[in-house]
Amino acid sequence: MHFLNPSAFYLLVFIPIVVLLHFLKLRRRHHVVPSVMLWLEAIEDMKANVPFQRLRHSLLLPLQILFLLVVVGGVARPALRQLGGLGEQSILVIDTSASMGATDLGETRLDVAKAKALKLINRLGADGQMMIMDTSRPPHNIRQIFTSDREKLHQAVENLSVAHTGPSLRPVFDSVVAYADVSGTQTSLNPDTIGVVFISDNFRMLPDSASSAQLQKIGSGNQSENIAIVQFSVTRALIPPNRYQVLIGVQSFADTLKEFQVQLGIEGKSFFEDEAVVLPPKETTSILFSLDDDERFYGQVVTTSLDINDDLSADNSASAILHPPSKWQILLVSDRNPLPLNAILKTDPHVSLNQIQTSDYHGVGDNDILIFDQFVPDPLPEGNIVFLNPVGGLPFMPTQNNRQPIRVIDQHPTHRVMRDVSLIDLEVKVSLQTQLPLWGIPLVETSQTPLIWLGEQDNQKMIVFAFDPFDPDISNFAASIPSAPILMSQCLEWLGTATSPIQPDLVRTGEPVKIWIEYPNEVKEVIVQLPDGTRRELKTQEAQIVFADTTQIGIYTVFVDGEPLGRFAANLLNPQESDLSPPPSVDNANTGINSGQVQSDLPEVNREIWAYAAVLALLLLIVEWWLYHQNRRFRQP
């Protein structure tokens, strides 16, 4: 209990005055009477008619002091701190992302969050209703619709488990707003009837839709140190072409220096010596393993792991599938001969090149990838395409000539096509001003327009160079950019993966995988076996199946009518989930959270109890009045 008006305690100065009044004795005036027979009591008083008298035994003094204490306490506005109540309807959102599997609290953060959720359910009123949601993708995130049945709510919370993905906060809170919009405007929440509670270990990435709610935030997790694999790729070296290169990026989220071993194995067997790593706090390092091309490795799983004991084990390993070298049939349509691109393509062991003139082009044929040099066929063919300087524009992309020199200001930091590529020094004298379609992804940007971009639409992949990369009078791309061959090889690799029945076969958890089925009408069942052994049966009406249930880390196996079609790997590789530190600040005017704090429960509210003090004071006053008059009656003769 605390007091909202503590200055009222200055009134306690009246207590000594009350006590003093019981010591004082008033002086009497002298009167002459004929007899003192009826004035015996007055005589007794007269004997003690002095300024002070001995304190008599009486209940009046303690009652008066107690009365004064209760009155002063009531004026000081006593209040009890209690947890805020839930609304008539409540939506409880529980974070089930990968970071909630951290064990810095002695148990997983999700277990702690579930315990807090159960306490909230137990506080639900008799007429209250609650919905349970997690942070997976809608509509699978609704674990229990609105109900007042506590058993069902308890069961929904108990059934929650950690998904090795990042939270899908934007669609989740968009659906929260939709469910909580009792006014029918679909734009705001009614805080008088709907309460939204979010239990999580990270409030940094809350979307704008969350600000529409009177959101209560409950934290789960402490400061934790973690080492994570944040990058993992398996490629083939350009020189020599018969070796695999396994690149591992490791990042420290710890505050102290860490020493550990990086291990690499194939199907559980080690073919390499462990790599010792000393990683300073908050730093990132890369480890590169090289592996000889060997037929016995084709289709095998290569796995890397960190030999370290930290609070999150999900990001301590990563896997990929080793593939035999691909051979792509590439058709280059160009009137220029020789073209520097020819030399680059011929040195790539994955490429079988065929070049024709634009006048000889009559269709795709059996080619896997098409490259059109300053030529756009009408209509556009099916298949995966590279456009080099499409001067006339594309059906989905109008262009204008730009004859002003431009320089690169940025490039895509994470796309696989830009891996180990730097085009910051690229200079272009003449380019095309383009208007990207909605599905376009810029790879290299200038202050005016993207120079290189890619995208995928209707199962067709395209890469567009909005300048002439192989004319030395136009750009220095082919002449002085050392990354040019790597970029072209990785462009072909991105385009060529479409020839595999499963693509991509290395994804982050939560990313979809496309599965191509030959003759889908003849297929009875397609089953995906998850890393934990459970199986998902997929519908097979179309040749392309999108599988998005990649919520587990490990190897997935695809079966078609009982026969294995192929495998793919899903890894966490998510620095945001591996960073287990609490958010630096939480600002929420609706809940009264101060900067630098994260709630551990619902916000506390003040429940004033001065009314009880007033009732008690009134009772004391009545008792004191009764005792006083009882004493006077007994003292009368």
Image (cartoon, rainbow, N blue to C red):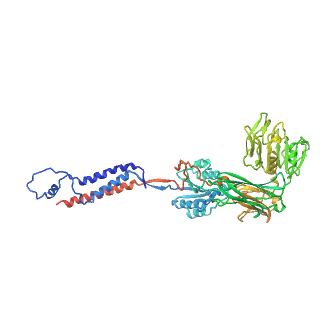
- Name the quarter where the N terminus is drawn: bottom left
Q: Nearer the viewer, residue 64 or 572?
A: 572
Q: Nearer the viewer, residue 322 or 59?
A: 322
Total label count?
A: 0
- Name the quarter where the C terminus is drawn: bottom left
* Res 393 → quadrant: top right
Give how far across and how far down residue 165 sits, in percent: 67, 56
Give how far across and how far down residue 241 sits, in percent: 84, 53
Residue ID at (58%, 48%): 212
Give how far across and how far down residue 635 sits, in percent: 19, 60
* Residue at the left extreme, as displayed: 34
- Could one spot residue 132 in this view of the protein? yes
Give how far across and how far down residue 273 sits, in percent: 75, 60
- Could one spot residue 167 in this view of the protein? no
* Residue at the top extreme, as displayed: 404
* Res 157 → quadrant: bottom right
Q: Nearer the viewer, residue 391 or 480?
A: 480
